[in-house]
Image (cartoon, helix red, strand yellow):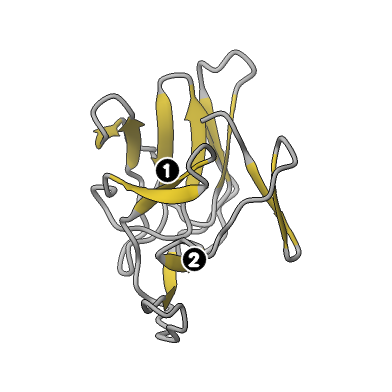
Amino acid sequence: MDRITFIKGEKRWTSDNSRVRFKDLRYWRLWGTKQVRKNSDNTGKSYNFSTCLSEVERYDPQKGRWEQLAPLNTARRALAAVTLPDGIYAIGGFDGENYLSTVEKYEESTNEWIFVSSMNYPRCTLSAVTSNDFRNIYVLGGFDNGPLKTVER
């Protein structure tokens, strides 16, 4: 990934100040839940705020469009995601019934998600950051039937 997307209000920009088109996304998302399934005429209005997604899409700046990648092994919402040199990590979240402690890593070379070491505590609506040396992931706070005040590495 060579661009980061920032969303501020209604303006959508990448780190190099080029515009990103979000209209090509198959679903609009809020915390990983399916919001609107777009019909072929882009007028879809099927709202569902409880369906968790396993779908993953990536924006290709050379082609100017979104492309679908391998799905996550576990559909989830309210997760955190970070990148390290060896891949993208999908951390925790909520699967519609359970708070998750599982972590999946995206292997770009094989286009697949693999499970890696789980967190000690399940959590959703968490924050995650990487260390300056890109050797560790820190997971902060979150929710599991109540606010969590823990940090994991």
* Crowd around label 2: few <14 · some 14–19 · many ≥20 (10 Å): some
Residue 29 bears which disc, if any?
2
Residue 133 at x, y percent in the picture = 60, 13
Give the residue type at disc 1: Ile
> In the figure, residue 118 lies in which quadrant?
top left
Residue that badge 1 annotates? 91
Q: What residue lies at 42% left-to-right and 36% top-to-bottom?
A: 89
Residue 98 at x, y percent in the picture = 32, 62
- Label 2 SS: strand
Residue 81 at x, y percent in the picture = 49, 42
Give the residue type at disc 2: Arg
- Taking the image as shown, residue 128 lies to the left or right of residue 9, namely left
Q: What residue lies at 57% left-to-right and 29% top-to-bottom?
A: 2
**Is residue 39 positioned above or below 95 on the image?**
below
- Label 1 SS: strand
* Crowd around label 1: few <14 · some 14–19 · many ≥20 (10 Å): many
The residue closer to the viewer here, 93 or 143, is 93
Q: Nearer the viewer, mark 2 or mark 1?
A: 2
**Is residue 71 positioned above or below 85 on the image?**
below
